Image (cartoon, rainbow, N blue to C red):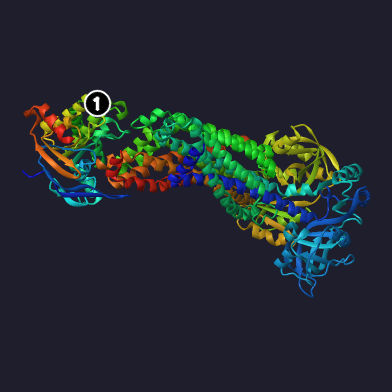
Amino acid sequence: MRAPARLGLRILRRRPLRTALTIAGIAIGVALVFAALSVDAAAQSGAQGYAAQLDGRSDLVVRAFGEGTLSPQSLSTISGTAGVLATSPQVRRSTFAWAVAPGGSVATRSLGALTVVGVDPASDRAFHDETLASGAPLSATDDAGAVLAQPWASAHGLGVGSRISVMGGGGERTLTVRGVLAASGPALADGGRLAYVTLTSARSLFALSAGTADLVEVRVDPAVGVAAVETRLETRLSAEPYLLSTTTDDAASLSVASRDVGSGLLLVAAVVLFVGALLVSDALAMSVAERTREVALLRSVGATRRQVHAMVLVEALGLAVGGIVAGLAGGAAITAALVPLVGSITDAPVSGTPLDAGALAVAAVLGLLVTVVAALGPAWQAGRVSPVEALRATPALTRSSGAVGRSAIGGAAASVAGTAVLILGGAVTGASPPASAGTIGSGPVGTFLAAAAVALAFLLLMLVAGLVAPAVLRGAGAVIAAAAMPLRRPLAAELRLARGSLSHDPARVSVAFAALAVGLGLVVALAGIADGMRRAGDAWISDVAPVDAVVVAISPVPDSFGADLAGVPGVASVTSLRVFDVAIAGRQASAVAVDPAAYARLGALTFEAGTRESAFAALQAGGAALVPRSVADRFDLRVGDALSVRTATGEETLRVAGIVAHGLPGASGESVVVSQSDASGLGISGASMFLVSAKPGAAGGLAAALSDVADRYALSVVQPSAIGGAVTGALDRTFGLLDVLALAAVVVAVLGMLDVLLMDVRQRVGELGLLRAAGLTRAQAWRAVVLEAAIVGLAGSVAGCVLGVLGSTAVLGFGTTAGLRLDVPWPAVALAVIVGLGGAMLVSVYPARLAARVDIARALRAE
Amino acid sequence: MRPILEARDLTKTYRTGEGEVEALRGVSLAVEPGEFVAFMGPSGSGKTTLLQLLGGLDHPTSGEVVLDGVSVSFLDDDRATRLRREKTGFVFQAFNLVPLLSARENVALPFLLSGADPASREIRSRVDDALRLVDLEAKAERRPAELAFGEQQRVAIARAVAGRPAILFADEPTGNLDYSTGLEILQYLYRSCTERGQTIVLVTHDAQAGAFADRVLFLRDGRVLEEIAIGRRAEHPARPLIERLALLGQ
């Protein structure tokens, strides 16, 4: 067995360029899988670390539901529960702040949004380590002092001794900065926009009753355990609604965005690796075909089938080891580049270049397994070579469609095996939990099932590609011939040779064609999905807020502010809304209180069930609600159903008067629409935003005109397009990242094409020598090869665009509520054609140069 | 009459890993228009190298080749290619045809390569004429793989003569064929020479093939050992000649 193994390794050395190309194909896949898993692990650990810093030594947090507070009775119940070692109550509310000039008493400069955190300094220190950057810690009796977090203080030029003014339900308070906290621990929350004050001061600022709090941090006796205390608290707390969360829950919630990105990365990486697997299978199959006589000679001098199998498998093993080593090194570099990008997308900070050992092991095993499985087909093919082949003058070098089918099956088998490793790897690394976009997959199983589906779809695609390749290549050849019409005469020979070469042996390039189509299809599909989601986001915003500006309050303000906004020149109408938290069937949801008549006049909402007139009339009459489709599906609601809604201060049963396509976004998804009078019954009043319509021709300057009044009431003016822009920006960053990785699949495919063209030129040296002897110039030989690559590139691009558009249409149609609608992402399609065509032509330059430099005498002599 | 092809003191040295090999050591010759010349000799005598230099496929180490009044030995690649396309035709032992083209397209290949329109009336007529010469009009649309070996070689002859080249070079054209098919091929070459005045330079180690030539040059160790002018085949009995050539070739 040793001799064939040595031969296998020698073959790799004999064809260094092909070896390098195949290794590069494997390496790119391994690198991306390694990077995806590492970044995912980094994001998870970043989220956990961040959550741990925010939560400090607390094991549980009890929060008041919605805008309610925890009563003194609840606080006492919590601290008196068996197993609770310590508690720290907090008041935590958002407001606006202004700077106060030294020596003065008037606010001079807006400092923007600020979260005021009221704590009992002694109990808070038992939970969190505070590191003061300057000044002194907060004293328990200092109701006029505040300690700021460094990022925000530095951004606004505030330091010890500075004075700030904050506004709350209890009026305006001026606080003096006693100290500045370094940017660590709880001071990282809310981007560092924090001011710590005493509990008494916070209660007074926000007009809260004595002894109440918004949340309580709880430290649990380890001997009792978090779960036991959680159960006891759930049993004992009954004074008002609350939310109970553990540190783990907080970490999970923080890592949702990173997990979505991680899942996407892993999916794309898997596809890249599968493309690589296919090319490994194809390269080995071509290599075996090229060495048919050599294999036959080995067989004729006594090599067993098993030895021939071993030779091919050792060759694959050599490629795998090279690919894994290069891939892991490349993966480390990609991880370093991706970490800041992913950090900009996720909520929790992700930093450093953490190289996860589990990720490394999974990527290495995956690379090895995928390569070796991809080599099984070629090994089998080599084992079947008859010793008689050695006696034939010219062994058949062209590949049958059956051989292509075997390559496809080999690639797909490798893909399926790879998916199995990914699933196991997911279990090992704990990577890739739920995707919330609802478009690709959901949950770890969903993600990996999606990867398995991709692998199977891949198999199908490759088999179909083998069948359609001749027709598509013919079509692409005709297109290029037509495009070259003005030059047709000078290019006629090259075109004829290129097209003839492809039609003579389409199987030769069909794998490269299919791999290119899959890679470019992925690029186009991702772009199509991103476009669809952008459109859906824009449609959502224009559906629920069809106005020229939205004025947002950081905490509820009196409705009467709306009258001042209505008085601004250019304003046609102002509609106040109040978004609040509710519990429906014991689960948290969002609701919005509206003036039904005013909201209906805006033309807002699209009704899926129930009619606009009757639904708004029912809302006006009271006791009714309009339910967004997502909420209706979540709670299985239909028009006419009763809907029990509970807040911290009240409970009502409403009738579903209509199902609408979308509702305003709230903290817990889309908001159920209720009338302001019903909201009053739930204890909800005031406004959290105002929808402003401009008079004809006044929309342009509306935001500027509103800003004076808005600033006075600490409101912010947002244009609906800016909301759309924020959504688009986030989508662009996420999908841009995935697109870059999808392009890696194209790079692998293009490398495969280079391999095919090189082998093609080598196999056709005799034919090229003959053509040169018959009068083919070097330039013509060069052009013929480049044109052949161009035809394959164009065919791959076109097929990729078709696949991508169909794929994105299917994903958007079946994965979202958008419905089936054929939308072509033209910029991505143009990019795909440029990259596919350009990439193929670019890599053909070297093989074309070899073809042009064929030494006629030597080529003929060799034959 | 001015020779159509002249070789003046040609030498060719190849560098190998073990040193230099002198394939040709000062060969001079001249071929008249319409003449059928054969190069014979044992393996390694330099006959194929000589043909490649004469056909402009390779450059000599020293010496000169003049083809139809043009010195081809030191032309740049583009000009040498054009000259080959316009003045020469080749028939090889193997890889005679481009597998992806039909028989007709293979015959029209030199025209296609020169940028001429293969669909034009004149070129179609020349291609048809060449196919007719080798009796393959009926199989013009077949691909090489669909033709017998002898038929493939006939297509190669048709391609070589279709452009009405000044000279046709044939390198062991019967080497891969059985006796009767090989004889058939030689008769087609001979026919093009007698009926159309085609100048032919044939490389062969087969005395049977050499007997078709007007003149035979024997090469050994890169030199012309002997030259026999035997005249047109139709004017002499073939058998004694073949026996004599066979003896010389040993």
Q: Can residue A735 be seen?
A: yes
Where does label 1 land, which residue?
Answer: B178
Q: Please report the residue visible at 63 percent of the width from the left and 56 percent of the height from the top.
A: A340
Q: Would residue A518 be seen by someone viewing this image from the given angle?
A: no
Q: What residue type is labelled 1?
A: Asp
Crowding around mark 1 (Cα neighbors within 10 Å: few <14, some 14 to 19, many 20+) is: few
Image coords of residue B164 (percent x, y): 16, 37
Q: In this view, does A57 lie above or below A397?
A: below
Q: Is residue A546 left or right of residue B145?
A: right
Residue A593 drawn at (x, y percent)? 77, 45
Residue under the point 53% across and 34% down: A376
Q: On the rendered image, what quadrant is the C terminus of chain A found in?
A: top left
- Label 1: chain? B
Q: Which of A629 and B130 is in front in this view?
A: B130
Residue B30 falls in image quadrant: top left
Could you say which is closer to the camera, residue B187 or residue A646? B187
Residue B211 or residue A240, whichever sits in front = B211
Q: Residue at x 86, y 59 (%)?
A: A126
Query: In the rendering, at what x and y percent does residue A131 appear?
Result: 79, 65
Q: Is residue A426 left or right of residue A498?
A: right
Query: What residue is rendered at 61% in x and 47% in y?
Result: A34
Marks counted in the figure total 1
Quadrant of residue A151 within the rendered picture: bottom right
List the single residue furthest toward the bottom: A103
Q: In this view, does A213 lie above or below A856?
A: below
Rendered view: A768 above or below A399: below
Q: Where is residue A84 in the image (x, y as percent from the top left)?
A: 90, 50
Task: Label 1, secondary structure: give it.
Answer: loop
